[in-house]
Image: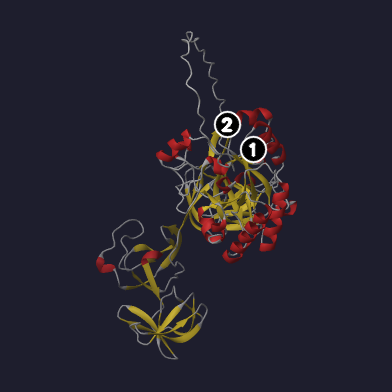
Amino acid sequence: MGLKKGWGLALATLGFGLTMGVTTQAQAAKPIPDISEWQGRLTGTQVHSMKSQVNFVINRVQYGYNYEDNHHRNNESLYVKYGVPFGSYDFATFKSAAGARAEAQRFYQRSNKKTRFYILDFETTSMGSSAANAAVKAWYQEMRKLTKKHLIFYSYQSFATTYANSSRQAFDAQWIANYSQRPTVPFSLWQYTSTYYLSSLNQRVDNSLYDKATVSQYHSLNWWLNKKKKKTTTKTTAVKAATPAKAAAKPVVKPAVQAKPAPAKVKYSYSKYKVGQRAYLRPAATHYYGGEAIPADKRKQPYTIKAVKAVTTSRSKQIVYVAGLNKWVLAQDVTGFWRSKSTGKFRVKVTMNVYRDAKMTQKTGAKVLKGKKVTGHVVRAGNYYRIKMDKGGYISAKARNTSFKKVKYAFSSYKAGQNAYIASKAKTYYGGAVIPASAKLKPYKITKTKTKVTSRSRKIVYVRHLKHWVRTQDMIGYWKKGSKGTFKVRSKANVYKKSTLKHKVRHLTKNSRISGKVIKKGHLYRVKLSSGGYVTAKVSVISKVK
């Protein structure tokens, strides 16, 4: 469930980060595992062994109205047979209040009536906050008509406060998932990890705590097990005669302690995807996280990742929420790419071939070695994404094979013959020589330009007067004094009352056209508009039309 289908990180002792105090306490307490079809069809031997290891089990019954957990009936019958207390949960997929009521009815019908309590697992939705709260309220009200047993609300903290902040308050208790720290909202059960090793199953599971020292709203174990307090009576007995001395006690022979079987070693898929990346749903992906079947026509397509969760299940340590499908998918079932138009520096994690074309059908013979950095931008080729390198050629834009650092490049479309001055913050010429203060804030003519990606520049320009190449990030170019005609705004600009560019009078949007003449004001240049007012004559702000 939850941070198995919930947000967060995991414990320090399991390779994640949580405080030592919680870890020690978790090791001492009996576990409260979350079981679903992901743990498989349990056997009598497993459940019999589990009885002495757990306080109780929380078992998934369904993944929304249309999907019943494959093994819940078998597993629940074994819990009853071997005396393992359990609660039941509904992983919600409803999209309205009416859908929530119908889902609650189906959940109750499917549930084993020996369950000690019922849980709404609400952690994904396409509804807004208001509609989501109304739907959760409807689910609660429908279940309350059907049962007097405890109703529990489950979610991860940020989702609960966003989509069920008012409706969750009606529930008898709240079960909150947070793997990075103790929840800061009221909670009676805390799911703190998805990697607790349960020896009876020989696998890792979600685990939770309910003790007084941990939770903010404590309920006793009897409360969770739906046991009523028994009345106690005091019996008076006659004084017994002295008992004869006991025979010497027989020596106690302790049975040999069997070593716990080591957990099966799993080779996990890449599980470090980020929000905003593109996720290609693999052809072999058959089920969403939770068990619902993936339609064939939804596979082999790219989707945008809208959220990620730390999870350890199957061969994945993460699930990703994809837009369009509005479903959680295991990391092992997607191939992630950097999104189109991502521009900047890429570090290659594995040696990669360079291709002439974006479809990557023609190798150039060159390679980018592991650890090397390249600059470029991401382009789309069908359902896949490639890095178009500034030096030429294409390599794969797979997220697992490259890291990315966004670079906001300075305007670099300067041309020979344009005027520019060196910015006051410029420090060195291209090549490393220090720029003297006397060379700054003076107008120069650009002699020639060269494509060269360096730092935040895509070009370098040569200034004959200085006899140096200068990065475009260190230059501010202006249209030549006396240039007149029609200019077009590249992105946005302001019109000012005076040539000092003070006292803004109006705003110009992208592609707006203006007419006027370039004048010089101090060491800077302005366009004096025919209609009145002044606009900067920076080449990066306006282009010359005619």
**Colour convention of the picture:** secondary structure
Q: Please state the total of marks drawn on the protein image.
A: 2
- Residue 410: x and y in percent read 43, 65
In this rendering, the answer to whether 57 lies above or below 345 is above
- Residue 467: x and y in percent read 33, 64
> Which residue is more in the foreground, 88 or 493?
88
Q: Residues within 10 Å of mark 2 (few under 14, many from 20)?
A: few
Q: Nearer the viewer, mark 1 or mark 2?
A: 1
Does the image show residue 355? Answer: no
Q: Secondary structure at mark 1?
A: helix
Q: Residue furthest bottom?
A: 531
> Which residue is more in the foreground, 84 or 484?
84
Amino acid type, callout 1: Gln
Residue for badge 1: 39
- Left or right: 320 as drawn, with respect to 98: left
Classify residue 429 by image quadrant: bottom left
Of label 1 and label 2, which has the lower sequence position?
1
Q: Secondary structure at mark 2?
A: loop
- Residue 417: x and y in percent read 42, 73
Does the image show residue 219? Answer: yes
- Left or right: 424 as drawn, with respect to 64: left
> Which residue is more in the foreground, 124 or 457?
124
Q: Residue at x 49, y 8 (%)?
A: 247
Residue for badge 2: 265
